[in-house]
Image (cartoon, helix red, strand yellow):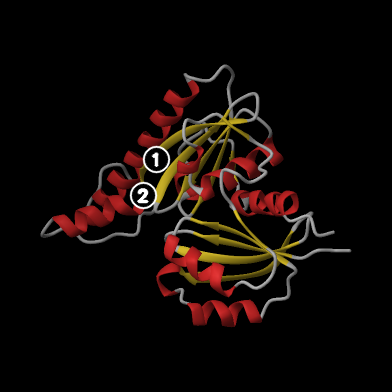
Amino acid sequence: MSVTYLLIDNSNTRTKFILSSADALHDERRMIPTREVNEESLEILLSELDYDAVVVCSVVPRVAEMLKSVIKKPCHFLSSSSKLGVGIDYPNPRQIGADRLANAAGAVTKYGAPCIVVDFGTAVTFDVIDNNRNYLGGVIAPGLASMGDYLARNTALLPAIDPREPKHAIGKSTVEAMHSGAVYGYRGLVKEILFQLESELDSPPIVIATGGDAELIAKGVSRIDYVDQNITLNGLRTIAVDNLPLS
């Protein structure tokens, strides 16, 4: 029996819906801005997809509660109690975000251990898995977009920007100067955090970047080995197989 899983990745910014087999992600994908998610939109979307079981990775309790009420098929909500293929060496595992656990599962399955996953989202998270495939913890820092947003909200003359690769370090306009500060400054933040994390590991880790700003920042951070935008989803896929054995 071939099982089709629906993978739901509910982040602070957007909620993704992806179909998957046990072995691979499917091409069909849907996305809703998380602020627009409601029970009606969820019911309509779920009725349009053909699947056997669902795995949910949610960091937004409001949406998680809606999903619990509208999903009628076998469903697993990812948590520290899930079968992950990764051990957890952390004082209070329930505090670990579901997205960070999915990243750890996806990274270890594809790239092995030790590794660090850097997820560039609303916040940027660094998740560390050691030689023994144990999740150790990591770092949470503000996301790249929040740097520009903060300046726009708290200064009288600085505009909001969409960070992009600067042409020069020396900005020739206010916007160019903000791009330079955001991108070069953020790359410096990432490099320093990776340096400090590696200093606490026994051997050099593989570093994987994912998330909305991963491509932009990774261009200037040679320590990042791979950019993989499917790391979270493939983590959910492996978790679905291990926690919803329907075949």
Residue at 59%, 47% in the rendered image? 102
Disc ID at residue 233: none
Q: Which amino acid type is marked by label 2?
A: Leu
| Mark 2 crowd level (few <14, some 14–19, many ≥20, 10 Å Cα) | many
Name the residue tied to disc 2.
144
Q: Is mark 2 on a helix, strand or loop?
A: helix
38 vs 155, left or right, is right
Farthest right residue in view: 1
Q: How far across and down, in percent of the image, does residue 48 sit?
A: 66, 81
Q: How far across and down, in percent of the image, does residue 123 sit?
A: 39, 49
| Mark 1 crowd level (few <14, some 14–19, many ≥20, 10 Å Cα) | few
For the C terminus, the quadrant is bottom right
Image: 103 above or below 162: above
Residue at 65%, 73% in the rendered image? 72
Residue 3 visible in the current orientation: yes
Q: Is mark 1 on a helix, strand or loop?
A: strand
- Where residue 46 sits, quadrant-wise, is bottom right
Residue at 42%, 24% in the rendered image? 196
Name the residue tied to disc 1.
140
Q: Who is closer to the viewer here, 32 or 192?
A: 32
Q: How far across and down, in percent of the image, does residue 105 sit?
A: 64, 42
Cα distance in 3D space between marks 2 and 1? 12 Å
